[in-house]
Image (cartoon, rainbow, N blue to C red):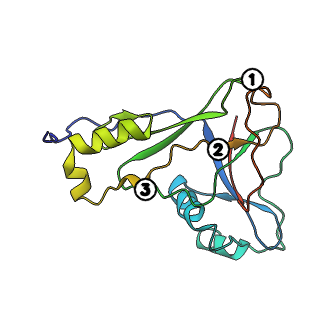
Amino acid sequence: MVREPNNKPAKRVWESVQQYTVRCGKCAKWRLIPTKEKYEQIRERIGQESFVCETGREWRPNISCNDEPDIQQDGSLMWAMDKPGVPQTPANWQRIIRVRAEGGTKFADVYYVSPSNKRLRSKVELERYLAENPSYKREGVDISRFSFQSPVALEADYVNAKRRLVATSSPDKSGILSN
């Protein structure tokens, strides 16, 4: 199947995430990340390279561990943690996180939107879509660059306890915030 040129504007996809944060590996203070793209770059490498406040000098020239945290877990926002090492989303694709209602069996749904505005909700759908549109593979889009794994809510009772899987702690130091 040949992909036709996309002349329609990109779909505006509403997602639940309002702010992206990372915790400093030295001082444990939370730092706001200015863009989703920068957050994804940091999240992809955080398992091998800890984030430190000085890394934030790219967007805040004088930031250091001596500064107050950018944000605190005060209960005004819903906090969730991403798994470390989730690959950065391929260029012109969008990774969308939609938080589910409280008390459900899962915290959030993750899906991807292709450059042609096709919404993909699972790895099976993505594999089928890439097979039907081989031009993406020629552009370097690979299935390994996608993760449908949902972030984990930090609020213990957000997901129905009877159906919730117990996760072990991880070295993850990146978080997402939602209203």
Residue 168, labelled with which disc? Answer: none
Mark 2 burial class by Cα count in 10 Å: few <14, some 14-19, many 20+: many
Q: Amino acid at mark 3?
A: Arg
Residue at 20% of width from left, 49% of height from top?
A: 134
Does the residue at mark 1 contact the one at mark 2 (Cβ under 8 Å)?
Answer: no
Report whether 22 appears left or right of 26: left
> Residue 76's quadrant in the figure?
top right
Which residue is tagged 2?
Answer: 151
Q: State if disc 2 and disc 3 touch (CB < 8 Å).
A: no
How far apart in space, not on screen, are marks 3 and 2 (Cα)?
Answer: 17 Å
Q: Which residue is mark 1?
A: 103
Question: Which quadrant holds the C terminus?
Answer: top right
**SS under mark 3:** helix
Which quadrant would residue 74 be assigned to in this image?
A: top right
Residue 63 is situated, as x and y percent measured from the top left of the image, at: 73, 72
Q: Is residue 75 above or below residue 53?
A: above
Q: Residues within 10 Å of mark 3 (few under 14, many from 20)?
A: few
Estimate the spatial distance between the alpha carbons at disc 3 and disc 1, rounded to whole Å.
Answer: 30 Å
User: Looking at the picture, which amino acid does disc 2 mark?
Assistant: Pro
The spot of residue 149 in percent (x, y) is 57, 44
Q: Which mark sits nearer the N-terminus, 1 or 2?
A: 1
Name the residue at 70% across, 43% down: 152
| Residue carrying label 3 | 145
Q: Give whichever of 127, 45 is nearer the camera.
A: 127
- Location of residue 9 in the rendering, given as x and y in whole percent from the top left corner: 29, 37
Q: Which structural element holds mark 1?
A: loop
Question: What amino acid type is highlighted by mark number 1?
Answer: Gly
- Above/below status of 167 relative to 65: above
